[in-house]
Amino acid sequence: MAVSVEGLASAVKGRVVEAGAPDYDDSRALYNAMIDKRPAAIAYCVDESDVAAALRYGIEHGLTIAVRGGGHNGGGLGSVDGGLVIDLSQMKAIEVDAGARVARVGGGALLKDVLEATHQHGLTVPVGIIGTTGVGGLTLGGGMGHLTRALGLTIDNLLAATVVLADGTVVQTDSEREPELFWALRGGGGNFGVVTSFSFRCHPVTTVLAGPVLYDLEDTAELLTWYRDFLPAAPDELGGFFAFMTVPPAPPFPEELHMRKMCGVAWTQAGEEESDALREARSFGKPVLDGIAPMPLPVWNTAFDALYPPGDQWYWRGEFIREIPDEAIAVHAEYGAALPTWKSTMHLYAIDGAASRVANDATAWSYRDAIWGGVFAGVDPDPANAGALREWCVSYSDAIKPYAMGGGYVNFHMDEPDRVRGMYGANYDRLARIKAQYDPDNVLRINQNIAPSA
């Protein structure tokens, strides 16, 4: 039975797309095509008052509410069957105060928009590695990427936020105003309100020496053994994630490598002058390809966008990892050789360095003692491969679990409620108390949900 959303279009200023509208299928489509949800309506809010009005409408009409920023959420938690989607994509204004080194970013902006805007002022904010990701989801989950070792997580650079609470109240929060809310936003996901604006500290980085150094798959054990010891001892200025990948059948990769399964490290170092650590990293073993070159940071930070457009099938999981014993290396080698499709991958993001010098209880992100954030991602355009993607991802994740820390990154999970407590780790109970304060009725529950608790 169709859910009535009569009166919604007159309650908000932005466009409302209802089921049955000509553009409904385009509007409801998510980045992960494995998720197919049919909301009653999508409200494209244009400002805080629109968000507040949409929330009030949803509550008054008993609609389940989901919030969508960039739409990348792996588990499809930016949409909901039969409910109301509050879409923030129209709220993407970005203002950069170059003198103060602060960027004020709308909740619907994408990472590539932020990087381009700050780059024009010789600045950047450390964010994730896919430019089409939404700033909101990335930030609220924590935000790890190429510059995490050097500049910290995205949340470590969050100075303030504007939040529409579940009851429609608009509040400003930072370390002094609503400090518990500000603490929770930094890693607690979308549980506490709809963030319509983020203020970030910027850093003077414009150019990076970056790119992949790839090795034969048979070198996996040797490379990963070296990498696990080398990188944590390297200066913070050097970042690099270990990866299994199939070489894309396109430039800039040489044709003789196309569609070859390989292992490697994607290195990143700010500036154009090669550090001793990067020089040492490039000289390890017998690389088949060294793709490191100087480039503008926004170019590197969007280099994978064309490889992973919207509409692929995705199944992914994450794990936080402190140590990589030889037994774990054997597991990685086994599953890396068994990538189910050419787009499937595994990354070990380095999240030590600057990020590790923040206390575990200083923000909601509770894995500051992790050295890597691992992601296992089965990806393919063909829905017929969905089962194989899931099976490989779950099996790989389960096989690594004995060597992991008991939880994974909020942004690297499907909708698996039994895994949620582990994602928030030791900070879960405090988050549940803050949830009870700011959203006691759990209005915002289409997320990696924290149930309110006194």
Image (spheres, helix red, strand yellow):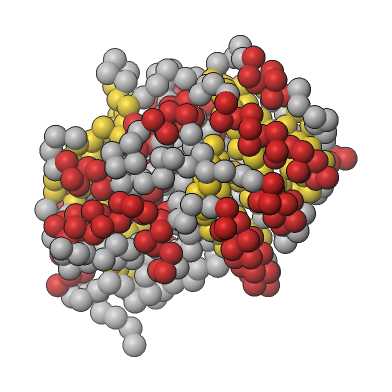
Q: What count of labels does the image hold?
A: 0
The residue shown at (36%, 46%) is 366
Location of residue 54 with respect to 263 vertically, above or below: below
The residue shown at (53%, 33%) is 146
Task: Residue 269: give x, y in percent of width and height.
Answer: 57, 22
Seen from the viewer's position, the closer of residues 385 and 119 is 385
Quadrant of the frame with the C terminus: bottom left
Seen from the viewer's position, the closer of residues 105 and 434 is 434
Q: Quadrant of residue 105?
A: top left
Task: Residue 131: give x, y in percent of width and height.
Answer: 50, 40
In the image: residue 420, left or right of residue 296? left
The residue shown at (37%, 70%) is 80
**Does residue 56 show up?**
yes
Q: Quadrant of residue 127?
A: top left
The residue shown at (55%, 16%) is 271
In the image: residue 320, left or right of residue 259? left
Quadrant of the frame with the N terminus: bottom left
Location of residue 273 with respect to 49 vertically, above or below: above
Residue at the outermost bottom position:
1
Location of residue 83 with respect to 434 vertically, above or below: below
Task: Residue 255: give x, y in percent of width and height.
Answer: 85, 39
In the image: residue 184, left or right of residue 123? left
Seen from the viewer's position, the closer of residues 6 and 80 is 80
**Does residue 93 show up?**
no
Residue at the outermost right position:
256
Task: Residue 160: give x, y in percent of width and height.
Answer: 23, 35
